[in-house]
Amino acid sequence: MASSTARPTIHGDGPEEEPVARRLLHSAAVLSYDPAVEVDWDTPLDRDFHGASPEWSTLYGTAYWQELTEDQRRELTRQEAASVASTGIWFEMILQQMVLRDIYGKDPTGAGFQWALTEIAEECRHSIMFARGAQKLGAPAYRPRRAVLELGRLFKTLAFGEAAYAAILVAEEVLDVMQRDWMRDERVVPFVRTINNIHVVEESRHMKFARDETRRRLRGAGRLRRQVNALVVAGASYFIVTSMVNKAVYAQAGLDSGRALAEARANEHHKAMLRSSCSGLMDFLASAGLLTRPALAFYQRAHLI
């Protein structure tokens, strides 16, 4: 949280923001997708494909994985992909509400205001796309546990400025690395690859703006403000990342839930995948002064560093 009495905003009205916002508006005008048209929703699910790259499965590399049949492995990755998509909907809804709250009353003629609405529109399409994708994968409605849902409600209400954008950036960056692998993997069912490609292309604009806003909001920030915000970002990131794969996926895939959960928690391969996906992100947080000793504890518990 800021030490200043003035309340920082997510989307400011300053002149520094306008050139970035104008470039992003141009990018959105040139390269955007309509998932309702681009994704093949009509072809029945081909169960000979995975839902995600097997290497990203929480059980990949474990003794249990070696015992699974190919059909079981494919079903597990489909359920895990659906869970990640459902978590994506959750934190995209958090982002949408924070941005809408912030631009209320702002000058609608500014590029920053118009980019904010463009970003919200893209996030709305992504959420619908993820929901339809999870449904087509044959998955139930995976949700974070109740305590995490309520913490998310608190975060979206109170977080602002660099704390808001940096926390969402963590979730977007982790998801981006996963999806770049999945969209290129011919073992993944084609409609999921299309979903991943759309999200990677459009989310790159959101991550660009989030990084710029985080740097700009922290310019001139004092030590206390950085320390507090670093802890807020790390805490939010921990709950977002650890909610990506719901523990219910194992039973839904027909596995021994207790054994699967125990082996997933101890899976060093999956922890290494998460760490490797976050190396650039951790460098950014360190350069912004948001990788403090207390914050490191959260990132280490989430296996992001």
Image: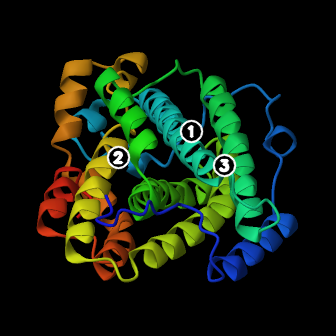
User: Decide: marks 1, 2 in contact (CB < 8 A)?
Assistant: no
- Sequence-earlier tag: 3 or 2: 3
Label 3 vs 1, first from the N-terminus: 1
The residue carrying mark 2 is 241
Q: Where residue 71 sits: x, y (%)?
A: 48, 28
Instruction: Give the Cα distance between marks 1 and 2.
Output: 16 Å
* Nearer to us in this view, 220 or 166: 220
Kindly identify the residue that appears in the image at 48 percent across and 53 percent down. Answer: 175
* Kind of residue sitting beneath label 3: Tyr
Q: Is residue 37 above or below residue 142?
A: below
Q: Which residue is drawn at 65% across and 33% down?
A: 133
Q: What quarter of the picture does the N terminus occupy?
A: bottom left
- Please give left or right for residue 159 compared with residue 299 in the image: right
Disc 1 marks which residue?
A: 93
Residue 77: x percent and y percent? Answer: 46, 36
Q: Name the residue under label 3.
A: 104
User: Is residue 23 visible to the viewer in this orientation of the structure?
Assistant: yes
Alpha-carbon span between mark 3 and mark 2: 29 Å
Q: Residues within 10 Å of mark 2 (few under 14, many from 20)?
A: many
Please tell me whether mark 1 sits on a helix, a strand or a loop.
helix
> Is 84 placed left or right of 137 in the picture?
left
Could you tell me which residue is drawn at 68 percent across and 63 percent down?
201
The type of residue carrying mark 1 is Met
Q: Where is residue 61 in the image (x, y as percent from the top left)?
A: 27, 47
Q: Quadrant of the C terminus?
A: bottom left
Mark 2 residue type: Val
